[in-house]
Image (tube, rainbow, N blue to C red):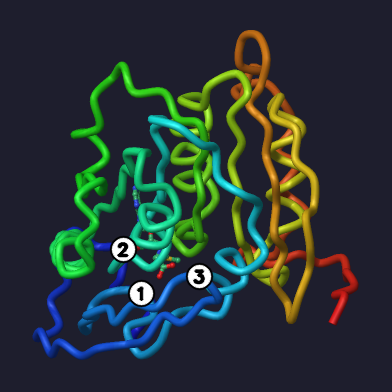
Amino acid sequence: MNDSQYWTDRPDVASRPTEVGLLLPDVNLTLTTDRGVFSADRVDRGTRYLLLDGPGLPTGPVDLMDLGCGYGPIACTMASRRPDARVWAVDVNERALGLCRANAAAAGLANVEVVAPDDVPEDVRLAAIWSNPPIRIGKPALHDLLARWLDRLTPEGTAHLVVQRHLGADSLARWLDDRGWTSSRRGSRKGYRLLDVAARIGPPADAATGPDVTDGASADGGDRRSGEDST
Ligand SMILES: C[S@@+](CC[C@H](N)C(=O)[O-])C[C@H]1O[C@@H](n2cnc3c(N)ncnc32)[C@H](O)[C@@H]1O
């Protein structure tokens, strides 16, 4: 699929639904995907890494979010692992939202709320955000997106992001730290970074005046400096 298509509201490629398997030690789902959504042919490797190596989710009747849910592998896994929680599955791509809604329903996961970003109620505070974020929308839009939702974390809340190193994972981590969140690298595997991000305390850092620490990234968002993967 052309990468430029998956984050539009209404993909213009013709629909051709297919199915992919999501097999984890604790989750076994068949998910419907389609052209015009991210990684329609198989569960993305980065997504799978997050689902396998991410931390335990908060317990109890908390609000959780899959930011940029696509057809829902992360949202459905979170909902399956935490039936008491409410999982907000958020995306701008209407085809992806429809697929995620259908996949959650088919899996019997009634605790997934599949909505456009503006339809998340203002008073919702998130105990955890998991995301394979849409790096390719560009740095300004990505930064706005992350700032919007990271500031909806509870004080103890954490976010867990999987980002390809060559698409700017390390400069994104520096940007987060510079803006008052605290990031740490949970792991690194086959070109992906798994970042843990803690809620920021106090007023947001002034993004308008601070240096743009992502300037170390190349035009396609990739880092110039090298980094080591553990595998
Ligand atoms: C890298 S994909 C990950 C999809 C899915 N979570 C997965 O792992 O297969 C990122 C997703 O973010 C969505 N997205 C782009 N801009 C967004 C925005 N402003 N708010 C929410 N989601 C957005 C894209 O449409 C895309 O589905």
Labelled disc at residue 38: 1
Out of 90 and 3, give the one closest to the viewer: 90
Out of 155 and 93, give the one closest to the viewer: 155
Find residue 166 and report its horizontal and vertical position in percent: 70, 72
Out of 155 and 223, give the one closest to the viewer: 155
Q: Is mark 2 within 8 Å of ligand 1?
A: yes
Distance from Cα at disc 3 to Cα at disc 2: 29 Å
Find residue 17 and report its horizontal and vertical position in percent: 15, 87
Out of 49 and 226, give the one closest to the viewer: 49
**Which kind of residue does numbered mark 3 sit on?**
Asp
Read off the residue under disc 2: 7
Distance from Cα at disc 1 to Cα at disc 3: 23 Å
Q: Is mark 1 within 8 Å of ligand 1?
A: yes
Tell which residue pokes out farthest to the top in this image. 202
**Image height of 178 relative to 161, above or below:** above
First of labels 1, 2 by sequence position = 2
Distance from Cα at disc 1 to Cα at disc 2: 8 Å
Which residue is drawn at the image coordinates 75% and 40% (left, top)? 183
Labelled disc at residue 113: none
Q: Quadrant of residue 108?
A: bottom left
Marks 1 and 2 in Cβ contact (< 8 Å) = yes
